[in-house]
Amino acid sequence: MLEEGLSYPLRGDSAVGRFVIGGVLGFLSFLVIPAIPLLGYLTEVLGSAARNEEEPPAFENWSNLFVIGVKALLVSIVVGIVPLIVLGVSLGSTMAGLANPDSAGFLAGVGVVGLFASFLAFLILYYLLPATLTNLALGRTVGSAFDVDNLSRTLLSLDYFVAWLIPFVIAIAVNLLTVVLVAVTLGLGGLLVPFIQFYTNVAIFYMFGRAVGANVDVSELSGSSASVPT
């Protein structure tokens, strides 16, 4: 899986064009709007990989990429709302402890426990989100993202656990490498970071998509999009 994932972004005659577009969108993501079709594209990568297609999807039909990007954002918010609430409570408790010395010990304890709970919650988020986004890419609706049967088959499979563990390690390694790159080049390497991140994300999303595709009926999920409400 690792070798296939790392080679997947390089497949096809339009690989260079994909890198340019993906990197530029990543570079402009601070403007928010460019981040939406980029998220839509990465979601399409999940679906393409689940269908076992040989090459990454092309950057085309921008209206479709924007729509699926908005849906992916909504799914991400729904999945991430609990970890964000836990994190907010823990940070609020910590800040309240600093502002009120009389209750600092208790509130600080609550904050530490909350931060640990937040860490666990974000691990769960990272485990759950790619599966829901792959369901979205296949079913095309927000409702299909939360198909319980497909999610349970995927999340409890060894394939998906490996697909979660390997990209997790890759993401940490790439982030460390980009920090070193930026430091060594006195900041100039920062211009390459969005392109490196795009390559890494496509490779990681491929691994997740393949793992989901190995555990669900892709044709059935794709065919159910017309009957699932958005």
Image (tube, rainbow, N blue to C red):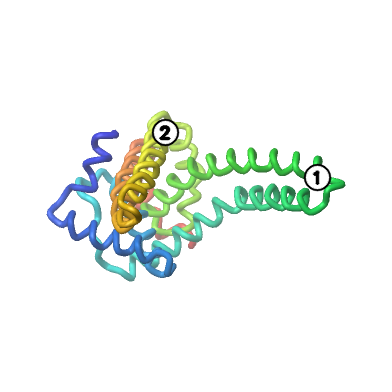
* Kind of residue at badge 1: Ala
Measured from the top left, where is residue 145 in percent x and y? 46, 52
- Quadrant of residue 99 within the rendered picture: bottom right
Q: Earlier in the sequence, mark 2 or mark 1?
A: 1
Determine which of the numbered discs, if any, sits on residue 165 in the image.
2
* Kind of residue at badge 2: Leu
* Image point (25%, 40%), residue name: 6
With 167 as the anchor, is 127 left or right in this view? Answer: right
Determine which of the numbered discs, if any, sits on residue 104 in the image.
1
* Image point (47%, 60%), residue name: 73
Which secondary structure lies at badge 2? helix
* Image point (39%, 42%), residue name: 176
With 55 as the anchor, is 226 left or right in this view? Answer: right
Res. 193 visible in picture: no
Determine which of the numbered discs, if any, sits on residue 36 in the image.
none
Between the residue at mark 2 and the residue at mark 1, the CA separation in whole angstroms equals 37 Å
